[in-house]
């Protein structure tokens, strides 16, 4: 949408901008919470250990963290009984993606029980708060109300069929509920779990380069989360980012360019598959040549990490006051300095910090919409260029957003009213990128180097780091013994959208 | 939200409709809807590539039937039936996005007391997984048979469904 709007020079109406900000904001909050509790938590939380917890002590722990109402001993006893019934039925076995009882689990039983209770609460919570998407987007997932030139969500205080005061009140209620869970459950849980895993503040650092396109434009077009890049973990310098400096390499990917010693800017991008790997099923793949279906996106020919950690670091280093305050308060609570952010734990903490600030910002955006409606501005769409007859013969555009998982760019080349070329470079492509022409590893690869693995049969440590990036794709991790024989295969799970 | 009649049986087609045979579960749902009048207590659901989002469709559901493309290393079109705990055990070793979401959903269903009493999976060995909307011939040839397998399962759960007559199809 933004790629076409950029190509045609369309400026969307103010209400459309606010609606898009709100939709994206609640998407973040829901997506990050689901990631933490339903994808990532079981890397840190041992559900079986929760059976040994004392519900009274668990209640004391929970009440010491926040005044969240569901924290009585009876409540935790109920959750524990449910886990006990599940385990006693002998049916936990089939759900073997986690490593129950692994020595790498460090939480005391009470913290495990509390976390499992919150895992279950988060299921109901996420279902509820994302109703905002049904109100603003028609349905969730896969919203239906985005149009080139604006939105199709009607705004009219006097119409039952439009977004009116009643529906805004519903949104406010949902966002209050969202914020409450984030402030009283998610953030306290992260702060309570992190001290048991502080060694993970020294593991999983990755490439040390970070990219954010920035997002959430205000009425002047300024971005609330800033655009920028950080190289070599240098928080003293935030470099400007120009999308023209983005290229994709295929030197080590199963695609073909005429000249593979260089990357291509997405406007000139091409996707010509060229599989040169072994015929499946295979036992071993030679990674000295091409070895991935993922292209290698680069900024100024450097691999870049994208996502919440990149955004929070760039905002922090750019002087974003609110983000600095929350980051500093989290670091202070944990008694650590900003250098620990370059890690698996830092990635997981940054996602939580981002959720806190987006959840509070939702209230501002909703107020902005109310003020706009009150001023009599009901415009949601600019249709001047709806008819392709009004388009230039040839034009190009770049659409950017910061998706929950990171920098997302779409590039379009329009010629004779048709799409001449279209390329998307998505967050997980940046993070899971293989080597490029220069041979430098991508973020996942670099982050896994040096990761200690206690039991090669159960490499939960690898899952922790890969999951900390919130991969949008499923991928397999194969652990080989010295002779190249596969001794185990790990499936990395994915949730949500890219 | 609209009220809906209590659903006791959920027929869940999963897969990606854009990847040829990967979408076989959805093709079976479509053929089922075109050939049979299902009672209101039976819901058919295009699960696409969703996972946990499907959890709440299990509310009140006693019988869950999943239809999916399954890589077995067999001849394209080979059918597979699993039931009970074989289903999550089998799905947990799959490497494809939607088949990874479904075990998450079943795990959460266990902990939230939403797990259906009966769980059955019908799988088909895919042949072609390229970008495309159509099934490859050996898979397309199995769709009617799979619809009948679905009807067998419904009868096992004591659910009657009548074939659509000429009058039912007049509007199509």
Image (cartoon, rainbow, N blue to C red):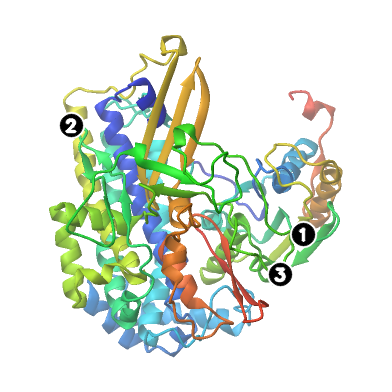
For the question of whether residue A210 can be seen, the reply is: yes
Identify which residue, A362 or A432, lies in the foreground.
A432
Task: Look at mark 2 in the image and give the residue it sits on.
Answer: A220
User: In the orientation shown, which residue stands out farthest toward the top?
Assistant: A389
Residue A37, position as x, y percentages in the image: 41, 66
Point out the frontmost of discs 2 and 1: 2
Q: Is residue A239 left or right of residue A271?
A: left
Compared to residue A111, the image places residue A306 above or below, namely above
Q: Is residue A464 left or right of residue B120?
A: left
Compared to residue A492, the image places residue B154 above or below, namely above
Residue A429, position as x, y percentages in the image: 47, 51
Task: Look at mark 1 in the image and give the residue it sits on.
Answer: B157
Compared to residue A20, the image places residue A404 above or below, namely below
Question: How many other residues sit within 10 Å of disc 1, few (<14), some (14-19) or many (≥20)?
Answer: few
For residue A283, the mark is 3
Chain hosting mark 2: A
Residue drawn at the location 76% of the way across and 46% of the way down? B128
Point out the frontmost of discs 3 and 1: 3
CA gap, disc 3 and disc 1: 43 Å
Question: How many other residues sit within 10 Å of disc 2, few (<14), some (14-19) or many (≥20)?
Answer: few
Compared to residue A61, the image places residue A417 above or below, namely above
Q: Is residue A148 left or right of residue A488?
A: left
Mark positioned earlier in the residue sequence (3 or 2): 2
Chain hosting mark 1: B
Identify which residue, A243 or B128, lies in the foreground.
A243
Residue drawn at the location 35% of the way across and 51% of the way down? A28
Where, quadrant-wise, is the N terminus of chain A in this rendering? top left
Identify which residue, A262 or A321, lies in the foreground.
A262
Residue drawn at the location 18% of the way across and 62% of the way down? A326
């Amino acid at each position: 949408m933004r790629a076409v709007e950029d190509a045609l020079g369309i400026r969307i109406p103010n209400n459309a901008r606010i609606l898009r900000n709100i939709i994206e904001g609640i998407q973040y909050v829901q997506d990050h919470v689901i990631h933490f509790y339903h994808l990532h938590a079981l890397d840190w939380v041992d559900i079986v250990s929760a059976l040994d917890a004392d519900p009274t002590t668990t209640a004391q722990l929970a009440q010491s963290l926040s005044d969240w109402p569901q924290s009585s001993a009876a409540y935790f006893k109920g959750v524990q009984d449910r886990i006990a019934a599940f385990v006693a039925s002998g049916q936990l076995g089939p759900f073997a993606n986690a490593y129950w009882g692994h020595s790498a689990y460090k939480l005391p039983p009470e913290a495990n029980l509390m976390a499992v209770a919150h895992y279950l609460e988060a299921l109901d919570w996420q279902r509820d708060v994302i109703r905002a998407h049904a109100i603003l987007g028609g349905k969730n997932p896969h919203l239906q109300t985005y149009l080139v030139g604006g939105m199709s969500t009607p705004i009219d205080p006097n119409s039952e069929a439009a977004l009116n005061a009643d529906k805004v009140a519903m949104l406010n209620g949902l966002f209050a509920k969202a914020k409450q869970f984030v402030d009283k459950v998610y953030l306290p849980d992260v702060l309570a779990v992190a001290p048991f895993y502080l060694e993970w503040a020294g593991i999983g650092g990755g490439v040390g380069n970070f990219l954010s396109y920035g997002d959430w434009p205000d009425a002047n077009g300024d971005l609330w989360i800033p655009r920028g890049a950080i190289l070599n973990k240098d928080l003293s310098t935030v470099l400007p980012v120009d999308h023209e400096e983005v290229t994709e390499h295929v030197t080590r990917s199963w695609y073909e360019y005429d000249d593979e010693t260089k990357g291509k800017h997405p406007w000139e991008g091409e996707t010509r598959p060229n599989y040169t790997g072994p015929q499946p099923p295979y036992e071993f793949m030679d990674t000295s040549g091409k070895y991935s279906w993922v292209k290698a996106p680069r900024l100024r020919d450097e691999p870049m990490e994208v996502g919440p950690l990149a955004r929070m670091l760039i905002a922090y280093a750019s002087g974003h006051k609110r983000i600095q305050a929350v980051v500093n308060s989290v670091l202070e609570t944990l008694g650590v300095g900003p250098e620990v952010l370059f890690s698996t734990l830092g990635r997981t903490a940054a996602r939580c910090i981002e959720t806190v600030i987006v959840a509070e910002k939702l209230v501002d955006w909703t107020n902005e919409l109310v003020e706009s409606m009150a001023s009599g501005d009901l415009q949601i769409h600019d249709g001047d260029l709806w008819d392709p007859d009004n388009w230039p013969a040839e034009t190009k555009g770049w659409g950017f957003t910061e998706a929950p998982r990171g920098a997302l760019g779409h590039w379009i080349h329009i010629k004779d009213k048709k799409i001449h070329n279209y390329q998307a470079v998505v967050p997980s492509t940046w993070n899971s990128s293989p080597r490029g022409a220069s041979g430098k590893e991508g973020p996942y690869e670099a982050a896994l180097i040096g990761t200690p693995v206690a039991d090669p049969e159960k490499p939960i440590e690898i899952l922790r780091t890969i999951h900390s990036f919130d991969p949008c794709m499923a991928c397999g991790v194969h652990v080989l013994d010295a002779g190249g024989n596969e001794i185990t295969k790990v499936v990395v799970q994915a949730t949500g959208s890219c | 939200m609209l009220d809906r009649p209590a659903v006791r049986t959920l027929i869940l087609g999963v897969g990606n409709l854009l990847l040829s045979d990967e979408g076989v579960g959805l093709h079976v749902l479509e053929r089922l809807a075109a050939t049979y009048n299902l009672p209101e207590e039976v819901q058919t659901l295009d699960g696409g590539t969703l996972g946990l989002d499907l959890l709440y469709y299990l509310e009140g559901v006693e019988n869950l039937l999943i239809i999916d493309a399954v890589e077995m290393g067999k001849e394209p079109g080979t059918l597979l039936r699993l039931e009970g705990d074989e289903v999550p055990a089998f799905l947990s070793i799959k490497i494809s996005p939607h088949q990874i979401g479904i075990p998450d959903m079943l795990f959460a269903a266990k902990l939230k007391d939403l797990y259906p009493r009966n769980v059955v999976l019908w799988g088909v060995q895919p042949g072609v997984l390229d970008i495309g909307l159509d099934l490859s011939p050996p898979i397309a040839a199995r769709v009617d048979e799979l619809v009948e397998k679905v009807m067998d399962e419904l009868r096992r759960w004591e659910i009657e469904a009548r074939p659509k007559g000429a009058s039912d199809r007049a509007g199509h």
